[in-house]
Image (tube, grey):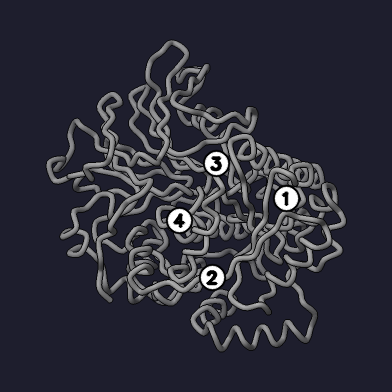
Amino acid sequence: MKIVFPSSTPRQFAIVREQGTGRPEAFSPPSSWAVRSFEDVKLFSDKDIPVIHCRFADGTTAGFMLGEPVDLLDPRPIEGQLTFEKPIDSQTPVDEWIEDQIYRYAGRFVFVLLAAGHRRIYLDAAGSLPVVFDREMRIAGSTAAGLLEPAEFADRFNRELFGTMNILGGGWIPAGLTAHRGIDRLLCNFYLDLDGWSVHRHWPTRQFDEAANPAQCALTIGEIIQRTISAYCARGSVCMALTGGYETRLLLSLTKSLRRAVDFVCFYSRRSDRDLVLSQRLARHFGLRFRTLKFPPVSFAEANEWMARAGYCIGENRNTFAVTRELADFDYFGGGVAGEVGRGFFWRPADGERAINAEAVYRRLGLPPCKIVEEAVRSWFATLPCHDPLLVLDLAYLELRVCCWASVQAYSAVGPRHVYPMVSRAAFSGMLSLPPSWRRDDDWLRLVIDANWPELLTVPVNNLGPVREAIRSAVRVARQPSLIVRRWRRRFA
């Protein structure tokens, strides 16, 4: 496969520390990028990524944000400037301030702290606006393509790792590694210290207390997600994915009062696709504004460009991504990404009592054996706040799967802005506080759906009946053997 440098870098950026940089002269941003200075940090960014100057109440600089944070207490768009009333001081240490002031926001964002003697980069709750960095060059940014010249982009490409991790067959590169030598990925729940160019975990700091009232906890999660959807509706036109699964069914239930403000779409390959059959049934029964879009053909060059924009760290959706171009008349496209944080994605029936180690975590990822990546997972494992087996698996899903697989596709997306209403610190904290039984059996999702739009549960979730499901499984095994191998590894290895 020929490695190409992307022809454009939409919504990408680079952050350079002006003092003590390693080789700032080696960085040459695209001529179309804007340049801004914040204290001793320079930001180079594409015109399509929003930049928000953050200040304290006394007018001093707190830092800046990239992306579109959503204030769960105020749905209005945040444009240009943001003021924090609470300072960082002896009464409010920096870690406490970050949780209180920054992680009150949902949405996709990067926050760069430039205050109280700190120079740090933080990601949103799922790292859905990704950041990579080069310790030697002392530069951080969106992807390898945003940091490197075309020749270096090709020279530093790790073809062996790309092949070993089976990127073209649905694999990905977890635990802070990328497909380019010397370029590391910042994981969600970690910050990058721009003084020492080191990464540190900042959340969670301990095991979660189990919710005393699981039903109320579930309803609160639903309210948080609903406020996030409402905020996007207040900002522009919204289209939401609709499948046969639980996450999009829950999102649909939370839009009952917003139905006239939200459209729905289902993507499909064949008319017999389960998602299509069930979503059409929902649309007919409940009068949704609904459209179906078949995945269009994608050329090899288009697929390669898509991977290049993501730094060649992901390849699974390279042949289907173009379908969202058909939604260009919307401002936002939303889906159920990261909802499985609350569903024990990596859990097995026997999990809960037995300890789990780094090797077991790697096997749960379902990825091929690879010493470099396995060592990176061991390093990640050493940062965990506790070794409760279920929390370990949940953080592995969020930090090693969602952050390194779903989020990595951010800069390759086409069409409207892609947003994830289920992503926020508040929602994740609620999910991780639910009793295991509520999560294993999807009780909390059904409760939220039942509380908001109970009739939706009359349409089966991810089920076409025993005969059609058996046929569907057989066809999928034949068409996607690499996916089946990965699932087998995850469940039985």
Mark 4 neighbour class, 10 Å CA radius: few under 14, some 14 to 19, many 20 or more: some
Callout 4: SS = loop
Residue 244, image x, y percentages: 71, 66
Is residue 287 shown above or below 359? above
- Residue at image position (50%, 27%) is 97
Mark 2 neighbour class, 10 Å CA radius: few under 14, some 14 to 19, many 20 or more: some
Q: Earlier in the sequence, mark 4 or mark 1?
A: 4
Find out whether the residues at labels 1 and 3 contact each other: C-beta distance under 8 Å: no
Residue 426 vs residue 418, the one in the foreground: 418
Find out whether the residues at labels 4 and 1 contact each other: C-beta distance under 8 Å: no
- Residue at image position (78%, 46%) is 256
- Residue at image position (69%, 57%) is 248
Give the alpha-carbon distance from disc 3 to disc 4, as whole Å. 18 Å
Which disc number belongs to residue 434?
A: 1
Give the alpha-carbon distance from disc 4 to disc 1, as whole Å. 35 Å
Residue topped by disc 2:
295
Residue 175, image x, y percentages: 41, 59
- Residue at image position (52%, 64%) is 323
Is residue 19 shown above or below 272? above
Q: Earlier in the sequence, mark 1 or mark 2?
A: 2
Q: Quadrant of residue 140?
A: top left
Find out whether the residues at labels 3 and 4 contact each other: C-beta distance under 8 Å: no
Q: Earlier in the sequence, mark 1 or mark 3?
A: 3
Mark 3 neighbour class, 10 Å CA radius: few under 14, some 14 to 19, many 20 or more: many
Residue topped by disc 3:
107
Residue 359, image x, y percentages: 47, 69
Q: Earlier in the sequence, mark 3 or mark 2?
A: 3
Callout 1: SS = loop
- Quarter holding the N terminus is bottom left
